Structure formats: C-alpha cells, structure tokens
Image (tube, rainbow, N blue to C red):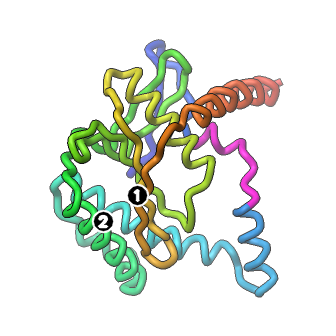
Amino acid sequence: MPRVIYKNKEGTRLAGVTTILGILDKPALISWAWNLGMQGIDWRTVRDKAGGIGTIAHYLCECDLKGVDPEVPVMQEYSPVDVGKAETAFIAYLDFKKNNNLQPIKTELPLVSEKYQFGGCIDCYCKLNDKLTLLDFKTSKGLYPEMIAQVSAYKALLEENGYPVDQCEVLQINKETGAFTYHQLGDISEYWLMFIDLIKVYNRKKKLWKR
C-alpha cells in the first residue's frame, strides 16, 4: 500500500502513528540484529526476506477482506518459498474467519485526529461476532508493548471520527514461519495514555531539531 500522507483541516501535514512510535527504543530488535551479526549473518538480508513473507500474508488477507483477487504480478515479485509460507498464514487466517462471524465494514481506512493532531491507517474495522471491532494485522514474531500502543491510537482515531469500538483484536502473522496467532486485547487505556505522552515528546523533539 502506498504511503499515506495525513493532513489536518488547515492542510498541515501530520505525523502518523508509526512515525510517532518510532521514537521508542526497541531493545528486542537490537538484540536480534546483534545475535545475527555474531553468527556472521547480515541482519538486513534476514529482515528483507522475513518482511516479504509478512507483506504477502498481509496482502492476501487484505484482498480477502476487500473481496478482490490478488494480483498475479504482485505475487510474482517474491520467491515461491516466501509465497508458500505466506499462504500458510493466509490459510490459518481463513480458518479463523470461518470459525468467527467476521463482517468487514472498512478496510485500509486513513483517519486524522484533529484533537491530538496525528494520523493513522486502520487495517480493518468490522463486526466480529456481532461486536464492532478494530482488527489489526501484525507481521512479527511476538506481540510487543509498542504494538498495543499503536492499536490504542487506532482505536482513538476511530472513536474520534464516529466509529464506535467494542473490542480490539490483533491477528499476528510470524513473518519468518507464517505461523498465525489471534490476540484478544482487553483494557488498553494505559497504552493510550503512553501514546499521548509520546505525541508530546515527538512534537518537542521535532521543534528542538529544527533549531
């Protein structure tokens, strides 16, 4: 999906959720890269390969939610091995969908918060088992705190723009193996408070860096 540019009503460009979260330290990522380096493996090669699997799997799920067929040229950009692992995750997603009443309402929905001045793109806003649900796809080996903070920001975006949210769910795809895990998130209000603090830090840092 092309990068989305977020602007407020005055036309001022706003930072996206992932950009704001980018100011956080990610010790798990640093440790992962260091361990690969100790084995003589270029972390960038592993990252790009794993990213490909996650990108394909996310793309397949997105196509299914939109009710469209995947484009063959897009799939041909990746190796058969990576496509195979991504299809493993996609089949698991289809099993999840089969066992749950999932009715998409909006997919890949870009929104802006005029109150807090940031933007974000929601993977899927749907009815899941008769509850209005924020459904977020994560291509990662685990579910980390910054990911939950991201979901909390998406929830705030939806609610501010008139989309009530009964629950927040994460569909996690392991971008290295294609394994699929479903996470039901409970109370994420503390993560939202943390994200509000990050907005302040991000804006302060941006202002200082311009001097």
Q: Which residue is mark 1?
A: 171
Q: Is residue 196 left or right of residue 127?
A: right
In the image, farthest residue toward the top? 10
Q: Quadrant of residue 26?
A: bottom right
Viewer-side residue, 116 vs 172: 172
Q: Closer to the N terminus: mark 2 or mark 1?
A: 2
In the picture provided, is 3 more to the left or to the right than 117? left
Is 158 on the left-hand or right-hand side of 93? right
| Residue shown at 60% from the left, 41% from the top | 19
Q: Quadrant location of residue 71?
A: bottom left
Instruction: Say which of 44 and 91 sits in front.
Output: 91
What residue is pinned by disc 2? 93
Type of residue at label 1?
A: Leu
Query: Is label 2 in a helix, a strand or a loop?
Result: helix
The magenta-colored residue range is: 18-27
Front in this rendered view, residue 68 or 209: 68
